[in-house]
Image: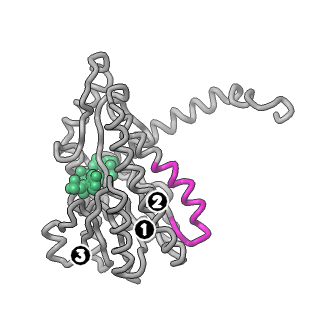
Amino acid sequence: MVKRVWFITGISRGLGYALAQAAHERGDLVIGTTRSGAAPEWLEAQGLHVLPLDMGDAASIDQALASAFALHGRIDVLVNNAGYGLLGSVEAADDREVRDIFAVNLFAPLAIIRRALPRMRGQGRGHIVNVASIAGIAPAPGSGIYAGTKAALSAISYALAQELAPFGLWVTVVEPGSLRTDFLSDRSVLRSGATIDDYAATSGRAVDGLLSKDGRQAGDPQRAAQAILAAVDAEEPPLDLLLGSDALQRARTRLDRFDDDVRQWEDVSRSADFPQMA
Ligand SMILES: NC(=O)c1ccc[n+]([C@@H]2O[C@H](COP(=O)([O-])OP(=O)(O)OC[C@H]3O[C@@H](n4cnc5c(N)ncnc54)[C@H](OP(=O)(O)O)[C@@H]3O)[C@@H](O)[C@H]2O)c1
């Protein structure tokens, strides 16, 4: 099999680490990014290329991509993995918290894609993998702003997939359920500074329930990484790749509800057309 060049953001730990390890172990060339540019111990020992990239800093995005293309002359698989969660009711999130998480989870991946595409389009093949979340498909109370960042990343990816198909480029949106990483730990997830007591029974309860799952999530990041490799290797890669049985169940529940609404309100939906169009 031809060696692929991977560019993966956020390989310091979690899913990004597992994916960098899996791609490297099978012989692909991996360029990973961490905030500091320091490589995690095991990856450093393997001689992986690690570049500094702070998702909140546009200059560091430019620099990381320039360095990546300088290393191997191409990127075959671009993985936007780095990201974090924000917990709390939608009303409690302040403007800065909202802007910060959209900057890291949405604007930075978009900037990376836009800066990589002029080179990737010229290659005639390649794959963009955007790590979104089941939350972007089936948002729950207590993580609405986070879900918004991931839903926006998914929607843009669906359009992008159609725009890039003529260039031989695939786009896959990865939607994990709960993965046993640091994601829910104090090292990663943020809680909105404000809380509003009136939401105790909705977002408050949902956040407590979510945080109580830390360390007991069903999803294995290494198996999730293998699933991503399978999608990238496929002749017809998926546009959406759900990871985990919880993701499957939440997606089905959301799709059923969507389907019910579409069918029950179909006549009202059609009634919005000018009469001569019906
Ligand atoms: N775990 C889950 O249950 C789950 C579910 C759905 C989706 N996801 C998504 O999966 C992706 C990976 O998350 P994970 O589970 O592996 O979580 P994780 O263990 O917390 O790892 C997150 C990674 O993102 C990096 N990162 C966060 N903010 C950054 C910033 N401002 N600049 C640069 N790097 C930054 C972290 O780097 P540092 O070490 O420097 O902080 C770390 O490498 C995320 O996009 C997350 O939203 C996770």
Would residue 99 be found to the left or right of residue 48 on screen?
Answer: right
- Is 275 above or below relative to 63? above
> Which mark identifies residue 24?
none
Amino acid at pointer 1: Val
- Residue 115 lies, in percent from the top left, at 45, 65
Name the residue tied to disc 2.
172
Residue 42 relative to residue 267: left or right = left
Determine the main secondary structure of the stretch shown in magenta.
helix
Mark 3 to mark 1: distance in Å? 20 Å
- Examine the image and state in which quarter residue 18 appears: bottom left
- Pointer 1 or 2: first along the chain: 2
Q: Residue furthest front?
A: 59
**Residue at the (69%, 25%) spot, across then down:** 268
Dot 1 corresponds to which residue?
232
Q: Residue at x 33, y 31 (%)?
A: 94
Note whether 227 is above or below 272 in the view shown. below
Give the colour scheme shown: one colour
Residue 134: name its quadrant.
top left
Categorize mark 1 by other alpha carbons within 10 Å: few (<14), some (14-19), many (20+): many
Q: Are marks 1 and 2 in contact (CB under 8 Å)?
A: yes
Q: Is residue 126 visible?
A: yes
Q: Which residues are magenta?
A: 153-170
Name the residue: 38% across, 34% down.
Answer: 144
Q: Which of the two marks, 3 or 1, is nearer to us in this view?
A: 3
Q: Residue furthest right?
A: 276
Report helix, strand or loop for mark 3.
loop
238 sits left or right of 147 in the view: right
Indicate yes or no whether the magenta region holds residue 162: yes
Return the disc, 3 or 1, that comes first in the chain's sequence.
Answer: 3
Magenta region includes residue 131:
no
**CB of mark 1 near ligand 1 (< 8 Å):** no
- Where, quadrant-wise, is the N terminus in this rendering? bottom left
